[in-house]
Amino acid sequence: MILPYQTGRKKYSGGNNLRARQPKSKLKIIPLGGLGEVGKNMTVFEYENDIIVVDCGLAFPGDEMLGIDLVIPDVTYLAKNLDKIRAFIITHGHEDHIGALPYILKEVNVPIYGTKLTNALIEYKLTEHALMDVTTRVVIQDGETIKFGSSFKVEFISSNHSITDTVMLSIWTPVGTVVHTADFKIDYSPIRGKVINLHRLAELGQKGVLALLSDSTNSERLGYTQSERMVGETFFGIFNKYKDRRIMVATFASNVDRVQQVINAASANNRKVAVMGRSMVNVVKIASELGYLDIPTNTLIEVNELKKYTDDQVVIIMTGSQGESMAALSRMSKAEHKQVEIKPGDIVILSATPIPGNEKTVSNVINALAKQGAIVVKDDTHVSGHAAQEEQKLMIALIKPKYFIPVHGEFRHLQAHANTAINMGIAKENIIILSIGDILELDRNSMKVAGTVPSGKVLVDGLGVGDVGNIVLRDRKHLSEDGLLIAVMTLDDAGIVVAGPDIISRGFVYVREAENLMDQARNVVRRTLDKCQRNQVTDWMLIKNYVRDDLRDFVWQKTKRSPMVLPIIMEI
């Protein structure tokens, strides 16, 4: 069920007093993600019997998370307090803010509030997971204020980011007003939508703000983040320079404004546009249907129509700017794409900065493209969606909070943002850097961490959510680094060896080139089994342990390697 903003929800003019009485309880702010890391953003606000949850994002796995698809927050605390939760409030449509919803809604199903585009992107995910019919979605507009339970009123304030329809939140509570910036930058000339509502932020600052939670992603960058329009100018320059070449642009699918600027440059140069990559196709479809993309008639073509046009007549927009192995650009770089092959002289524009940890992967893709003769352009083809230091200072100056809480970023980002706040005159004792799971309690007179809740990373592997933990990851790492050695033997009821032992190697040594080592390993297992028989050891678990230990010691002595050793006993 979806509820549009025109449903007659009561509007509130603002003000800090939700209750006439002096509040006795403290507001709790509990981050369940997004601190000390990039992604997985989720923050809980709790007052007495009411909880609202801001954002519900995922993170992508690190190199050490072998085989893992996604990482989502641990919501044990929310599941235990389900009766208190009034809503998920989503600030914008990026994966690190909406990506965990399909998994967490199966455990914590409460109404979702978000802007028009944000809700549309969420609905696409819910459809994939068969959750549309059981999830309530509420479309909100910036400037609207909604009451949640008896403790919260939330005003949605227009903001700028690298995706349209982003909002900041002003949260009224019985102890005071809290402002959550979400991801933001200050762009005075956005491609679409409104300029960030600095006037409203200044009004809130004049009335008094208890606490500011502010985006820290770019807190180490001096100056200002450039306007998105700068990228459009770069695109026009590249299109003019390479008029006779085929042009390809790789960017984030959710960066609708970036896609619009590619389409603008293509249209101005009489080029057709083909869209590649499942997520890119879906976002372009959703954004154009909702009116967030202006695509001239007859501009879009299917990928299989590219052969009808010459190189100077087409542009391809695709996913893969982060070097994702299954994305269109990566498959092209390896000559594995079924529909498009890289040709010498192709222009490939990388319109994104590598996410921390992806630098090597992106570099590999660039090298592979260069080997095929492509010209890779990546200078001035991207601007960040996050505020740099001067914008962060402006936010603090307008809001004038009593307490300052840096959010969204690794520890060094949070620390740099805290230092900026100190330089802006906020008392050091009124600034706190939280960790995931901390319970921050605050009121008009105090702020302190008063405990923790269960928190951490829940790993998604295929259809499994949370069934892969540290032990499984450790085993996968062991297997990937050292390989596997399997000892198979057949015993009768009395524990006497009937057949074997046989030694099987996977990822350890090539058996045909190590026959002598394999023969010696079999002899080691035979001696171990003989020793067990002499000592009347018949417990299979003990026998496996002895075989594992002796074989592991032998292999280490001979090779200085430590493969995983797996004894298997067959019974007759």
Image: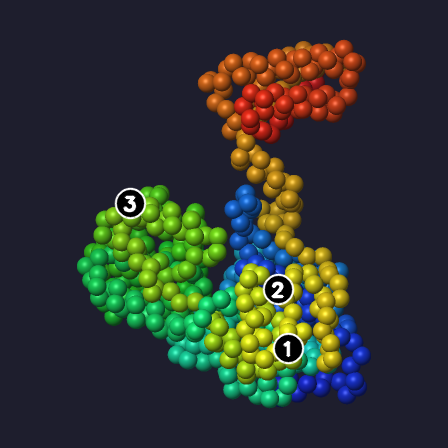
Residue 155 seen by the camera: no
Which amino acid type corresponds to the residue marked 2 in the rendered image? Met
Q: To which residue does mark 1 refer? A: 427
Residue 416 pos. (x, y %) = 54, 67
Circle 1 or circle 3, nearest the eye: 1
Q: Earlier in the sequence, mark 2 or mark 1?
A: 2
Question: Where does the N terminus fall, quadrant-wise?
Answer: bottom right
Residue 371: mark? 3
Residue 353 pos. (x, y %) = 41, 60
Q: To which residue does mark 2 refer? A: 42
Q: CA distance from mark 1 to mark 3?
A: 55 Å
The image quadrant of residue 226 is bottom left
Q: Which type of secondary structure does the marked residue at label 3 adopt?
A: helix
Mark 1 surroundings: few (<14), some (14-19) or many (≥20) residues within 10 A: few
| Discs 2, 1 touching: Cβ within 8 Å | no
Q: Is residue 92 left or right of residue 17?
A: left
Q: Residue, x 71% and y 68% (percent of image)?
A: 440
Residue 182 pos. (x, y %) = 55, 71
Q: Earlier in the sequence, mark 1 or mark 3?
A: 3
Q: Which type of secondary structure does the marked residue at label 2 adopt?
A: strand
Q: Residue, x 68% and y 57% (percent of image)?
A: 455
Q: CA distance from mark 2 to mark 3?
A: 42 Å
| In this view, 39 is above or below 327 | below
How many discs appear?
3
Residue 28 seen by the camera: yes
Q: Residue, x 67% and y 16% (percent of image)?
A: 490
Q: Could you say which is closer to the camera, residue 483 or residue 108?
A: 483
In the displayed image of the protein, which residue is found farthest to the left?
Answer: 244
